[in-house]
Image (spheres, rainbow, N blue to C red):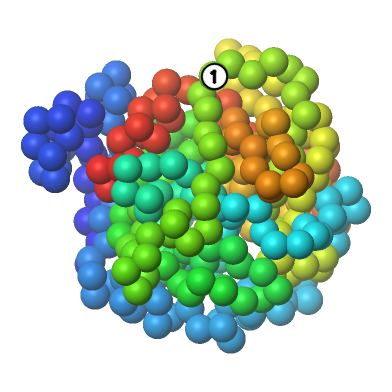
Amino acid sequence: MTSILVRSAATIAAAGAALAMTAVPASANADVVTEVSEADRAAAVDYWTPERIKQLGADERLAPAEKIATEWEGAPPPGLGRLLYTSEPGADGSCTATVVPSPTNDVAFTAGHCLNGGLMPDDTPVNITNVVFAPAFDDGTAPHGIFPVRAFAWPDTYGGPMASADDDAVIAVDPVDGKHVADLVGTQDISFDEVPSPVDSTIVGYPVSRLARGESPVSCALPATFRSNSVYSSWRSDCDMAGGSSGGPWLRDFDPATGKGTIFSVTSKGTVNSDGTTEDLNSAAFTDAVRGLYERSGQL
């Protein structure tokens, strides 16, 4: 079974693998951590057969094909992969995640709402299960296999799927055949430094639309503009990627020759019109709470 805990920086420093079992104020830089049992990890890998993954993009009610975003040419950028999960109650779904530098070489960065299911209208919790990571997913295949997620976390400043601020999360995956994911597919740098606006950005993800049906990466190369109000700060782009691109990296200083850049945010939400077409994308600006989440991710 999975277990949900709140882990603070002080807890980690004092107890290593020990976990705090009660909530800690946000000011203490706490992370909400879900640990996945070994049995559930094995079941998740078995669950995601090639046929089940393909079924995610088989529905003809998918969003229309993107008009601005285009299919990625060549091998996926280093570290990019597809995050697969099941919402209970709900259905199978997918997001995007990116491997980032970590002490364990096992950590990827994504959006909080990909892993925080929130509540149903009757306040029934939505559990996220069968969480796995398929690095370098392309042309409907996972060339490096399916990596079970042993733990995932978001900052306790994130208010759940209806919230926008701090919509970020990390996953820690088990090695497969003794190999760590970062060693197999590389990483993208990540930075929490202030970024001037507008900034040239390359946004990549796995939208489950009629363009690629989630089977290959899709990208936009467009300026991103910073916006701030009394509630939260965010980045905006005219990129039109559909659902499934959530958690995908927003990269600055992107080098097409290496496929590498620096993550300064990840896809959070988009404006969708009446026919299901995405009109723009937004990403939550990184905060100190998110920086802390990343800095502690090597403890997962």
Residue at x-position 40% and y-position 82%: 46
* Residue at far right of view: 67
Look at the image and tell me in which quarter the N terminus lies: bottom left
Q: What amino acid type should be assigned to the residue bearing mark 1?
A: Asp
Q: Is residue 45 left or right of residue 236?
A: left
Q: Is residue 101 left or right of residue 241?
A: left
- Left or right of 45 on screen, residue 216: right
The reply to whether residue 281 is in sight is no
Residue that lies at the very extreme toward the front in this rendered image? 257
- Asked whether 70 or 158 is in front, the reply is 70
In the image, residue 30 above or below residue 61: above
User: Count the marks: how many?
Assistant: 1
Image coordinates for residue 278, horizontal then vertical, percent: 80, 48
Residue at image x 48%, y 78%? 48
Q: How far across and how far down the image is residue 126, in percent?
A: 41, 58
Q: Which residue is mark 1?
A: 193
Q: Residue furthest bottom?
A: 51
Element marked by disc 1: loop
Q: In the rendered image, which quarter is residue 238 located in?
A: top right
Q: From this view, report whether residue 43 is shown above or below residue 239.
A: below
Badge 1: how crowded within 10 Å, few (<14), some, or many (20+)?
Answer: few
Residue toward you, 24 or 193: 193
Instruction: Give how far across and how far down residue 184 sits, in percent.
Output: 48, 61
- Residue at the (59%, 63%) spot, across then down: 136
Q: Is residue 136 above or below residue 55?
A: above
Q: Nearer the viewer, residue 281 or 162?
A: 281
> Which residue shows up at 70% across the image and 31% down it?
253
- Residue 290 position by quadrant: top left
Residue 69 seen in this snapshot: yes
- Place of residue 256 in the rendered image (x, y in percent of width and height, measured from the top left): 76, 45
